[in-house]
C-alpha cells in the first residue's frame, strides 16, 4: 500500500464514537463525531494540564482553567442543536459588542442598535437564513442614531464604527449557526491553530525571515507564526477528517487576520485588552477575534 493510499485511508476513517450513559433519569445514547471531538478535547486538556502544572507558571494555569470552562460552555450548546447554537452565538455577540462599544467609545444609542443586531442575526440564521443576504441594507440602519440626534461632529465616525461591528461581530457570529454541525470542530481548529502559530513564531525565531512581523500592529505576529498556523491548521483539520484548501486558508490566514484586526482597534484605543473578566485572556473579544473572520470564511470557502 502506497503512502497516498495510507493518507487517503486516514482521511476517510469513521470518526464517530459511541457514548452510553444511564444514571437514574439521565439516559444518553449517542453515536456521532461529536463524541470523538469530546474525547479529543478531554485528552488535550488533560495533557495540557499536566504540562501546565509542571511549568508552575501562574499565567498558564490561569489560561488552562479558563479553557476547561470554555470547552463545555461552547461544546454543549453546539452539540444540542441549531437553536442552542443560535443562543450561544447571540450571547457571545452581545458581550462582544458591549466590549467593542467601550473600546471605540460608542454612545448608548449606537450600542443598543448593535445589541439588537447581535441577537437578530443568529436568530435569523437559525429560523430563516435567507434573511442574512440583507446585511448590506441593515448596515445602513447603523447610521440612524447619529442622523436622528443630528450629530454633525461625530456622526460619521459613530455610524462607521457601528456599521463595521454589525458585520464583524453580529453577522460573523451568526455563521456559528450556518456552519452547524461543524461549529465546534471549527472552534477547536481555531484554538489549536492559535497555539501552532505561537509555536511557529517561537520555534523559527532564529531564522531571520521568520522574525519579520506581518504588520507593525503586532510585532508578535510574524512570518514564522504564519508558517506555524498554516502547518497547524493542516494537521488538525487532517486529524479531524475535514481538511481542504479552503478550510486551511480560512482557519490559518483568517485567524491571523482576525488577531491583527483587533490589534488595530486596541492600538487605536491604547489598551492592552478589550476587557479584564476572562482570566488569562482579557475580554471575550480578545478570545474570539480570530473566530470572527474564520467563521464566514469557512462557510464560503469550506
Image (cartoon, grey):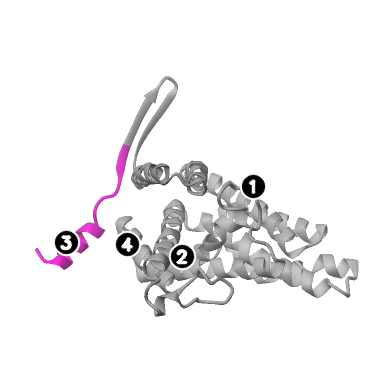
Q: Residue 74 in the image: x percent, y percent?
A: 51, 46
Q: Are marks 3 and 2 in contact (CB under 8 Å)?
A: no
**Within-10-Å neighbours for mark 1: few <14, some 14–19, many 20+:** few
* Stretch in magenta: 1-18
Q: Which residue sits furthest top?
A: 24
**Disc number lying in front (4 or 2):** 4
What whole-number distance in Å separates the C-alpha atoms at marks 1 and 2?
29 Å
What whole-number distance in Å separates the C-alpha atoms at marks 4 and 1?
32 Å
Return the residue nearer the eye: 110 or 271: 271
What whole-number distance in Å separates the C-alpha atoms at marks 3 and 2?
27 Å
Residue sitting at x 42%, y 61%: 193
Which quadrant is home to the C terminus?
bottom left
Query: Which is nearer the N-term, disc 1 or disc 2?
Result: 1
* Residue that carries the numbered disc 4 in the rendered image: 235
Query: Which is nearer the N-term, disc 3 or disc 2?
Result: 3
Residue 20 in the image: above or below residue 114: above
* Residue that carries the numbered disc 2 in the rendered image: 298
Residue sitting at x 46%, y 55%: 187
Query: Which is nearer the N-term, disc 4 or disc 1?
Result: 4
Report helix, strand or loop for mark 3.
helix
Q: Residue 109 in the image: x percent, y percent?
A: 82, 59
**Would residue 247 be seen by someone viewing this image from the given angle?**
no
Query: Which is nearer the N-term, disc 3 or disc 1?
Result: 3
Q: Magenta span has 14?
A: yes
Residue 6 numbered tag = 3
Residue sitting at x 34%, y 65%: 234
Query: Which is nearer the N-term, disc 4 or disc 3?
Result: 3
* Residue that carries the numbered disc 1 in the rendered image: 277
Amino acid at each position: 500500500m502506497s503512502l497516498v493510499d495510507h493518507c487517503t485511508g486516514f482521511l476517510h476513517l469513521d470518526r464517530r464514537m459511541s457514548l452510553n450513559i444511564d444514571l437514574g433519569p439521565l439516559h444518553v445514547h449517542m453515536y456521532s463525531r461529536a463524541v470523538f471531538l469530546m474525547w479529543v478535547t478531554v485528552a488535550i486538556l488533560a495533557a495540557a494540564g499536566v504540562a501546565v502544572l509542571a511549568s508552575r507558571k501562574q499565567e498558564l494555569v490561569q489560561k488552562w482553567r479558563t479553557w476547561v470552562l470554555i470547552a463545555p460552555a461552547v461544546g454543549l450548546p453546539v452539540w444540542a442543536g441549531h437553536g442552542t447554537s443560535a443562543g450561544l452565538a447571540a450571547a457571545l455577540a452581545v458581550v462582544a459588542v458591549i466590549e467593542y462599544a467601550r473600546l471605540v467609545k460608542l454612545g448608548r444609542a449606537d450600542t443598543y442598535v448593535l445589541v439588537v443586531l447581535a441577537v437578530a442575526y443568529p436568530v435569523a440564521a437559525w429560523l430563516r437564513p435567507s434573511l442574512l443576504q440583507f446585511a448590506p441594507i441593515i448596515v445602513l440602519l447603523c447610521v440612524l442614531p447619529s442622523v436622528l440626534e443630528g450629530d454633525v461632529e461625530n456622526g460619521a465616525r459613530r455610524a462607521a464604527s457601528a456599521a463595521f461591528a454589525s458585520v464583524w461581530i453580529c453577522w460573523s457570529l451568526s455563521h456559528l449557526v450556518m456552519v452547524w454541525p461543524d461549529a465546534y470542530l471549527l472552534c477547536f481548529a481555531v484554538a489549536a491553530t492559535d497555539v501552532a502559530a505561537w509555536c511557529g513564531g517561537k520555534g523559527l525565531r532564529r531564522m531571520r525571515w521568520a522574525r519579520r512581523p506581518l504588520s507593525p500592529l503586532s510585532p508578535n505576529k510574524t512570518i514564522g507564526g504564519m508558517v506555524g498556523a498554516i502547518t497547524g491548521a493542516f494537521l488538525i483539520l487532517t486529524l479531524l477528517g475535514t481538511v481542504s484548501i479552503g478550510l486551511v486558508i480560512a482557519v490559518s490566514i483568517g485567524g491571523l487576520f482576525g488577531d491583527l484586526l483587533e490589534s488595530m482597534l486596541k492600538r487605536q484605543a491604547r489598551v492592552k485588552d478589550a476587557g479584564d473578566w476572562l482570566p488569562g485572556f482579557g475580554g471575550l473579544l480578545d478570545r474570539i477575534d480570530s473566530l470572527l473572520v474564520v467563521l464566514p470564511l469557512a462557510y464560503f470557502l469550506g
